[in-house]
Image (cartoon, rainbow, N blue to C red):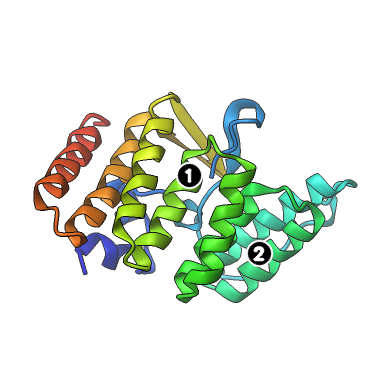
Amino acid sequence: MTKANEEMKSENPDSAIVKFKIIKDLNSRDPHIEEHIVECDSLIVQKNIDNKPPEIPTQTIIKGNLQEAKAYNNKGLRYSAMGDNDKAIEAYNKAIDLNPKYQQAYRNRAIQYIRKGNDYAALKDANEAIRLAPNDGDNYCTRGDVYNMQKIYEAAIKDFTKAIELYDKVNSVIYSDGKSTITHSKNTLKASTYYRRGLAHSMAGKKDAAEYDFNQANLLDSANY
């Protein structure tokens, strides 16, 4: 396990973000939403200082399935940031029940299933997210993560390559959990994906391709400073 992976599993996810600019699952962007403001992966959501369960204020629940679905999705993100995968999944389930076409909720739930080791459920959700938003690079990154988990490296490489192509078409993306936001540049998005593709190439025994990807990730990451 690399230092970055260890840091991503630690109580302080920010260090992993600074080092590799890995977002994912993250870890979420919808090109159809104005200004590309979307729900982010739990890796970039700050923990509550008092570590209390994230509650949704009554006034934030606006009538209409879409707004309610967003509120529950944000609740899932905050549970995810606290490491409570089961409650995060429950919140995403509710978001999807309210809006079955809510692609970010499918992707975020896929990320939780990855963390629980349920690759079958993760792949099903990642596929649905791609079906609903085929031009969202984050969806391909998520499915690529599932394929890496399943050791289907060629499929993972294909998805990461598609994500890089899609990220190349944007300038930056704003991620939000409903309370805080963070902006990632094109370079940051691509650096993260080159790194993940490099891992897939490495596991597939393609050392030269892996070295190229890791070098690209480092160059893009350095360009942010």
Above or below, 18 relative to 93: above
Residue ID for mark 2: 54
Give the secondary structure at mark 1.
helix
Which one is in front, 192 or 106? 106
- Residue 79 circle label: none
Q: Which residue corresponds to the image point at 34% horizontal and 40% vertical from the top-left?
A: 161
Quarter of the figure that contains the N terminus: bottom left
Tally the marks.
Answer: 2
Above or below, 81 relative to 208: below
Circle 1: residue type: Asp
Q: In the rendering, at what x and y percent does residue 73 appear? A: 67, 55
Q: Which residue corresponds to the image point at 57% horizontal and 62% vertical from the top-left?
A: 124
1 or 2: tag closer to the N-terminus: 2
- Residue 195 shows in the view: yes
- In the image, taking residue 64 as reference, residue 125 lies left or right, namely left
Q: Which residue corresponds to the image point at 76% horizontal and 63% vertical from the top-left?
A: 94
Which circle, 1 or 2, is nearer the viewer? Answer: 1
Circle 2: residue type: Pro
Which one is in front, 74 or 158? 158
Q: Which residue corresponds to the image point at 61% horizontal and 49% vertical from the top-left?
A: 104
Quarter of the figure that contains the C terminus: top left
Residue ID for mark 1: 138
Q: In the rendering, at what x and y percent does residue 194 appear? A: 27, 43
- In the image, taking residue 174 as reference, residue 3 lies left or right, namely left
Q: Are marks 1 and 2 in contact (CB under 8 Å)?
A: no
Asked which quadrant contains residue 57, the reply is: bottom right
How dense is the environment of label 1, judged by Cα within 10 Å: few (below 14), some, or many (20 and up)?
many
Separation of marks 1 and 2 at Cα, in angstroms? 25 Å
